[in-house]
Image (cartoon, rainbow, N blue to C red):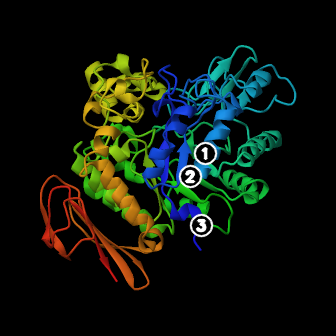
Amino acid sequence: MEKWWKEQAVYQIYPMSYCDSNGDGMGDIPGIISKLPYIKSLGVGILWLSPVYRSPGEDNGYDISDYCDIDPKFGTLSDMDELIQKANALGLRIVMDLVINHTSDQHEWFQKSRRREAPYEDFYIWRDGNGKRPPNNWTSFFGGRAWAFDEVRGQWYLHLFAKGQPDLNYRNPAVIDAVERVMDFWLARGVSGFRCDVINLLWKDSLKNGFPKGALVGSEYYIGRPGCHELLQRFRREVLSRYDCFTVGETVLVSTKKARELTDPNRGELDMVFSFEHMNADCFLVKWLPRKFKTQRLFRSLIKWQKKLPWNAVYLENHDQPRSVSRFGDDSPASAKAMLTLLLTLRGTPFVYQGEELGMTNFDFTSMDDIQDVESKNMVPTLKKLGLNDRRIFERMRKASRDNARTPMQWTPGPEGGFTTGTPWIKVNGNHVTINAETEEQDPDSVLNWFRTLMAYRNGSDVLKQGRFRLISREKDWIKIERRLGDERVIVAVNWSPKPVKLPLVGYPVLSTHGTQKLDCQLQPWEAVLIEEK
């Protein structure tokens, strides 16, 4: 029998932007609870929550000041217990974000470490500088140097991300013990696993100067090092193996070879990983260095990972990426349906981000004043150094900022999209008057109803949940794949373009985004079909 996490689809919720229950402009846990019937109706089986822990909010919750409590803006620990209980009663499992490469600089551990209080003196990576210069030349993922000087301690600390996110020191066994207690705390409360944030960065081999070329100076000393594998094996052995849970790792710059190592059941590390290679279909390694989107780049990467890994975490967008319908499509409902079709028929566990089931698009902000994202703001000096003026910088934000995925969930065509009765923490997209759950509920041809139809088919199809993957053919703008289990197979064909395409395809589809008329070797613009053969 397959593991339960191979049978279900995952629905990611960004709590700040999902549903506000008390009118303060911030999404919260009671708001999520109120939407559980809607989530259940989608056909998904797992909810992944982005962080709801206590946090000063420098990186929207990914800077955690207390791992074992809920931030008051989201509710209480009792609210979280209620969410777990009510979700479980509906057959929905909860997965939480595990952010353990770094904490907030407001965490008790850091505050005591900066004062050299036992046993926290070495919980973080502290070093003396070179005169007034930092200990080495490493750069941060968010731009600028990866070191900050602390006046209290009189030393520099490493932060691979924002200044308020100091990296933990995993050479200290007490840090490992503390992190394992955090995992135990939540698993014992009933969560079913973790999405592990930047999990392949935990172990730093050395603090030598990095090779001075490239976007991430120093990364050769901390991405996917052997010590990280040992840590993950220990977490599995000491904690995770005692629960019916799963882990999916956000793994930076991971190759298929490294991904196979991380997910090999015999090694006992992670169950799945998120790869990022297909996110390079419109950029050079990082989204801030754009190039023209090419469908073939996207197809090649997806196919490569389907062939190289026995099981994939399949996704097209999340809280860190722009909206896929704007990035890889043309903002139309038809392109949203086509993309969802491929997403839900590839081999692996599909991850769907809130609003993706509606075809939500990138933001419609008009100036940098609307931007909230710390990563985006920190990238401005770097983009200026690359010669971009203010206009071009904002155009880059419109296409790449994480705020694209963080605008509030669009529930109704009414004020603030039904997200809040107050003033939202970040602007609601103006197109909520047409793209919203309430309106799409009433439209049988909507993206939402296509998603539900497709999920119902997937949930009833052992071929799609368990079957082998085979590429039949692909061309510039279309792809045809086969999923097979025993003598049964499902053929999936997707036209990833706004123009009709001809391809070898005959028969009657069981599902089509354009209706189930007999095929004549032609797919209409953005049409996707499934043909079942027994």
Q: Residue furthest bottom?
A: 487
Circle 1 — which element?
Answer: helix
Q: Is residue 73 left or right of residue 418?
A: right
Mark number, residue 3: 3
First in sequence: mark 3 vs mark 1: 3
- Kind of residue at badge 1: Lys
- In front: 69, or 384? 69
Q: CA distance from mark 2 to mark 3?
A: 19 Å
146 is higher (above) or lower (below) than 523: above
Q: Which mark is residue 486?
A: none
Q: What residue is drawn where x is 73% and y is 32%?
A: 124
Disc 2: CA contacts within 10 A as few (<14), some (14-19) or many (>=20): few
The C terminus, quarter of image: bottom left
Which amino acid type is shown beneath numbered disc 3? Answer: Lys
Please tell me which residue is depicted at 73% across the width and 53% down the height of the picture. Answer: 235
- Residue denoted by label 2: 90
Residue contact at pointers 2 and 3, CB within 8 angstroms:
no
Residue identified by numbered label 1 = 86
Name the residue at 63% across, 26% down: 55
How many residues crowd mark 3 within 10 Å: few (<14), some (14–19), many (20+)? few
Give yes or no for contact between labels 2 and 1 (Cβ–Cβ under 8 Å).
yes
In the rendered structure, are the residues bearing label 3 and label 1 in contact, judged by CB atoms less than 8 Å apart?
no
Q: Is residue 215 left or right of 246 when viewed as pictured?
A: left
Please state which amino acid type lies under the numbered disc 2: Leu
Q: Quadrant of residue 273?
A: bottom right
